[in-house]
Image: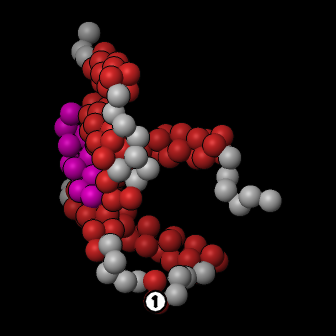
Amino acid sequence: MSTTPSIWTLSVIMFLSGIGIPILATWNAALGNQLGSPVAATFVLFAVGLVISSVLLLFVGAPPAAAFTMERPYAYFAAAFMLFYALSVTWAGPKMGIGNAVFLVLLGQIFAAALIDHFGLWGAVKSTLTPRRMAGIVVMAFGIYLARKPV
C-alpha cells in the first residue's frame, strides 16, 4: 500500500491552501489595522503559527537532531520569504485592496514557479518551459489582469 496521497488529494489540499492565502491576507490586514502596526500583526501571526506547529510536532514527532545540517543552508531561509509575504500583504493589502494584492502575488508565484520548474532549482522536479506552457502562463497572467482591471 502506498503512503503517497493521490494527485486528487494533493490537488484538494493545494486548492484549499490557495483559498487560505486571501483569507490570511484579509485577517492579518485587519489585525494590522486594529493594532496600528503591520509588524505587530505579523509577529502575532508567526507566534500563533509557532504554537500550533509546536503542538503538531508533538503529535507527529520531531526529526532527529542529526537531520538539522547545513547541507542546504538556503532551505532555512524560506521563513524569510513567508515573513516578507505576510508583512507586505498586511501593509499593502488594505491600501490597494486584498484582491489586487493577492492577484499580484499569484502573478509572481506563476512567474517564479515556471522558472523554478524550468531550471529544476533547489531540487524541484524539472519541467521545461515550452512555448505551450509559456502561452498558458500568458493566458493566466491576462486572466489575472482582467479579473482585477477596474471597470
Examine the image and state in which quarter residue 136 appears.
Answer: top left
- The secondary structure that dominates the magenta segment is helix
Q: Using the image as rendered, state which of residue 18 and residue 130 is in the foreground.
A: 130
Where does residue 151 sit, x and y in percent of width and height?
A: 26, 9
Where does residue 41 sit, x and y in percent of width and height?
A: 30, 60
Q: Is residue 122 above or below residue 117?
A: below
Residue shown at 32% from the left, 72% from the top: 72
Q: Residue furthest right?
A: 1
Question: Which stretch appears magenta?
Answer: 81-97
Colour mapping used in the image: secondary structure
Residue 84 lies in the magenta-colored region: yes
Where does residue 117 sit, x and y in percent of width and height?
A: 36, 44
Q: Using the image as rendered, state which of residue 139 and residue 122 is in the foreground.
A: 122
Residue tagged by mark 1? 66
Q: Is residue 99 visible?
A: no
Q: Residue furthest top?
A: 151
Residue shown at 50% from the left, 71% from the top: 53
Residue 56 lies in the magenta-colored region: no
Mark 1 element type: helix
| Residue type at numbered disc 1 | Ala
